[in-house]
């Protein structure tokens, strides 16, 4: 009889442990995601906001944490008055010249997901992140301008940005996100692989 009770207890414990293990949700994976976004960026050395395109690809690094190499692009046109020293003085010697500036920030974005902490519905992801990298810039001046072509004298090549955001999963493979940040805020599509 003692053996029967002991075997019953062991079987009951095994069944209970298996039931608990099945009820426990598996840790959500956030990586293997391509994020394509468009939005608005503000850069202090330009003085106004600009349209921006960004993309990144997330990899799981630890539970609730991903790293994502990213690249973006923005471009704008600006104007500059310049007087040609080879022309006689007067109003004709000063002319308005234009230049086109293009910047490509590249780097890595680290993201921590708060779904577990917030007990979020599986359709939603909530996160905070930081991006760091470099900005590669190019400037093309209008023909005839021979003045100083150093537009970015005070601009740092370092890229730093802090983010908060959310994603809504429309399907298992696709979602839409809103990423608000200190520099570049985007709305876009997340594709899960």
Image (cartoon, grey):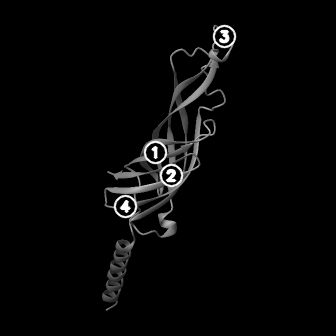
Give coordinates of residue 116: x percent, y percent. Answer: 48, 66
Q: Are marks 2 and 1 in contact (CB under 8 Å)?
A: yes
Q: Which residue is mark 1?
A: 68
Within 10 Å of the Cα at label 3, are there few (<14), some (14-19), or many (20+) other Cα atoms? few
Q: In the image shown, does 51 or 153 lie closer to the viewer? A: 51
Q: Residue 102: x, y in percent?
A: 50, 30
Q: Residue at x 51, y 68 (%)?
A: 118
Which residue was labeled with disc 3? 85
Question: Residue 183, how many percent across, how many down?
Answer: 57, 45
SS assignment at label 1: strand
Disc 3 + disc 2, Cβ < 8 Å: no
As drawn, the label of residue 111 is 2
State the separation of the CA atoms marked 2 and 4. Answer: 17 Å
Pointer 4 or 1: first along the chain: 1
Label 3 – label 2 distance at C-alpha: 53 Å
Viewer-side residue, 134 vs 18: 134
Label 4 secondary element: strand
Residue with the mark numbered 4: 169
Q: Which mark is residue 171?
A: none
């Amino acid at each position: 009889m003692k053996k029967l009770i002991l075997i019953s207890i062991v079987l009951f414990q095994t069944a209970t442990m298996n039931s608990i293990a099945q009820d426990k949700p598996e840790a959500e994976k956030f990586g293997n995601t391509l994020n394509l976004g468009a939005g608005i960026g503000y850069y202090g050395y330009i003085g106004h906001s600009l349209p921006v395109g960004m993309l990144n690809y997330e990899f799981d690094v630890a539970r609730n944490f991903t790293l994502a190499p990213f690249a973006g692009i923005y471009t704008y046109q600006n104007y500059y008055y310049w007087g040609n020293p080879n022309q006689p003085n007067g109003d004709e010697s000063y002319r308005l010249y234009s230049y086109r500036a293009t910047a490509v920030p590249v780097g890595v974005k680290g993201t921590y997901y708060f779904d577990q902490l917030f007990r979020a519905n599986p359709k939603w992801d909530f996160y905070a992140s930081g991006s760091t990298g470099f900005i590669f810039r190019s400037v093309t001046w209008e023909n005839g301008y021979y003045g100083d072509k150093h537009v970015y004298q005070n601009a740092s090549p370092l890229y730093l940005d802090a983010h908060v955001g959310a994603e809504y999963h429309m399907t298992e493979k696709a979602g839409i996100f809103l990423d608000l940040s200190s520099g570049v805020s985007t709305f876009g599509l997340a594709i899960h692989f």
